[in-house]
Image (cartoon, rainbow, N blue to C red):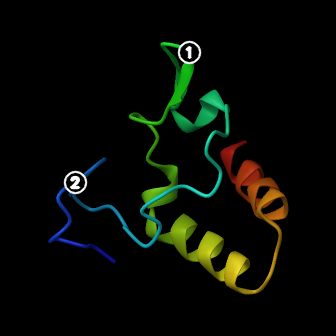
Amino acid sequence: MQRLNCERFPCHFLEQDCSLCFCPFYPCRDERTGGKEKDGAWCCDSCRIIHYQEIADMVLDSLLNGEAVSAVWKKLEARLK
């Protein structure tokens, strides 16, 4: 899903899924996502993972089904390997 009227669109890439505007895993501190430490804070500018439709769907479905954020992160970590 894209929110074309969002003032930040596209925040990462044109085909992004915007179902999760804010990452529930911030700050993940996992450089495999493309994120990195910058000026003492976790910077997600290069992370696209949460905006791929397959990932956004999995995360949103899992959270809406009552799974803990930590459990959903573990599922996502398995995909990063």
* Residue on which disc 1 sits: 40
Q: Please tell me which residue is depicted at 61% across the width and 28% down the height of the picture.
A: 31
Front residue of 62 and 7: 7
Examine the image and state in which quarter residue 75 appears.
bottom right
Check the picture and name the quadrant holding the N terminus: bottom left
In the orientation shown, which residue stands out farthest toward the front?
A: 40
Earlier sequence position, callout 2 versus callout 1: 2
Q: Position of residue 30 (x, y in %)?
A: 67, 33
Secondary structure beneath label 2: loop
Q: Local crowd at mark 2 within 10 Å, few (<14), some, or many (≥20)?
A: few
Q: Amino acid at mark 2?
A: Arg
Q: Please tell me which residue is depicted at 33% across the width and 61% down the height of the picture.
A: 16
Q: Please tell me which residue is depicted at 31% across the width and 47% down the height of the picture.
A: 12
- Image position of 48 (left or right of 4): right
Q: How many marks?
A: 2
Secondary structure beneath label 1: loop
- Image position of 17 (left or right of 72): left
* Residue on which disc 2 sits: 8
Q: Position of residue 81 (x, y in %)?
A: 73, 42
Q: Please tell me which residue is depicted at 61% across the width and 45% down the height of the picture.
A: 26
Residue 51 vs 27, above or below: the answer is: below
Residue 15 vs 8, above or below: the answer is: below
Examine the image and state in which quarter residue 57 appears.
bottom right
Front residue of 51 and 43: 43
Q: Position of residue 10 (x, y in %)?
A: 22, 54
